[in-house]
Image (cartoon, rainbow, N blue to C red):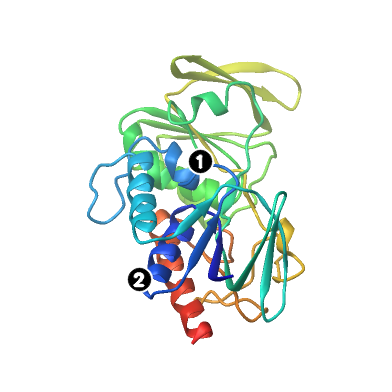
Amino acid sequence: MYDIIIVGAGPAGMTAAIYGRRAGKSVLVLEAASYGGQIINTPDVENYPSAAHISGFDLATQIYEQAKGLGAEFVFEKVTGIEDGQIKTVVTAKNRYEGRAVILATGSENRKLGVEGEDELVGRGVSYCATCDGAFYRKKRVAVVGGGNTALEDALYLADLAEKVYIIHRRDQFRGDETTVSRLKERENVELVMNSRVTGLVAEKKLKAIEVTDNEGNVSQIEVNGLFVAVGRVPENQNFASVVELDGAGYAVAGENCRTRSAGIFVAGDNRVKDVRQLVTATADGAVAATEAIKYLA
C-alpha cells in the first residue's frame, strides 16, 4: 500500500514524486518506458529557469536522481487501468498496486506525419516544439506543417528568427484564427504552400530538404534546415476514461488544482486540459497535484 501512486515518469510525475517524498509520503512511480518523457529527445533546453543550456536527457536525469534519492520508488511497467474506490488499485500487465491517491502524469504524444525517417531525425532537423527549438534555426530556412492555431503561431514565432518560413497545409484554407493568418501574410519571409502534404524527408545526418506533394500529385522539394510538425497531439488518457472526465480531444478535465471528478485522483502535465504545455508548466503541475494529494490524504 502506497500513499501516492504516480503514473508517468516525465517532468510532471517526477516533480510530484519529489513533493510527495518531501512531505513524508510513500510514493510509487509507474512508467511504461524510460524516465524523462519527451524532454529526453531535446538536445538543448534553453527555456528552463536556472539552466541556460542543458540537454533534455541530463535535466531529466537530475530530476529522476533527486526523486529517487528522496526515496521515491520507480517501477517500469505500463499501466492498463485504474479501479477507483477509497483505496485505488492501479493495474499493469504484470501487477496490481494499491494506493490512497493517484496522480496521472502520462503526458501526450505529438501526432506524427508518418513519413520515413521522421523518428530518426528528431533533434536533427525535425521538431515538434517551435518555442523549444526555434532558436537553433536563427537565420536558417524552416517549414511548419499544419493548419491550426498552433501551426500558425509557431510560424509567426519562427518568422522572427528564421531567414525563411514555409507553411505547408493540406487544405486551401487554414483552421486557425484569421487574424494570425493575416499577420503571416504580411511577413515577407513567410511563404504559404497550400493544398500540399510533406511526403518525404531528405537528409544527410541532418535534414536537408522536404518532399512536398500537392493535391494533384505533383512532387517538389523545398530546401530547409528545420521542419516543425504541428498537426496535433494525442494525450495518453485512453486507459483512464472510466475514472477521469475527458474532453473531445481526449485531455483530462481538471482545473488549476489538478483535481479530477474522482476523489483522490489527480492529473498533472500535458495530459490535462490547459493552454500552455511546456516543461516548466509540467513541473508546476506536478508540484500542485502532489500538494493537493497531500491535502487529500490528511
Q: Which residue is mark 1?
A: 128
Alpha carbon of mark 2 to alpha carbon of mark 1: how far? 34 Å
Which of the 4 image quarters holds residue 58? Answer: top left
Q: Quadrant of the N terminus?
A: bottom right
Residue 117 at least partly seen: yes
Under mark 2, the amino acid is Arg
> Residue 123 location in percent, x, y?
43, 31
State the SS at label 2: helix
Under mark 1, the amino acid is Tyr
> Residue 268 location in percent, x, y?
52, 65
In the image, farthest residue toward the front: 1
Q: Are marks 2 and 1 in contact (CB under 8 Å)?
A: no
Q: How many marks?
A: 2
Give the mark, 2 or 1, whose residue is nearer the N terminus: 2
Which of the 4 image quarters holds residue 188? Answer: top left
User: Residue at position x 57%, y 27% from top?
Assistant: 118
Number of the label disc, if any, that sits on residue 22: 2
- On screen, residue 78 versus residue 42, left or right, reads right
Q: Give the camera-side residue of 235 and 66.
A: 66
Q: Is 120 rendered above or below residue 95?
A: above
> Residue 67 location in percent, x, y?
38, 58
State the SS at label 1: loop
Q: Give the camera-side residue of 187 and 296.
A: 296
Q: Is 41 rendered above or below residue 222?
A: below
> Residue 186 location in percent, x, y?
44, 45
- On screen, residue 96 versus residue 187, left or right, reads right
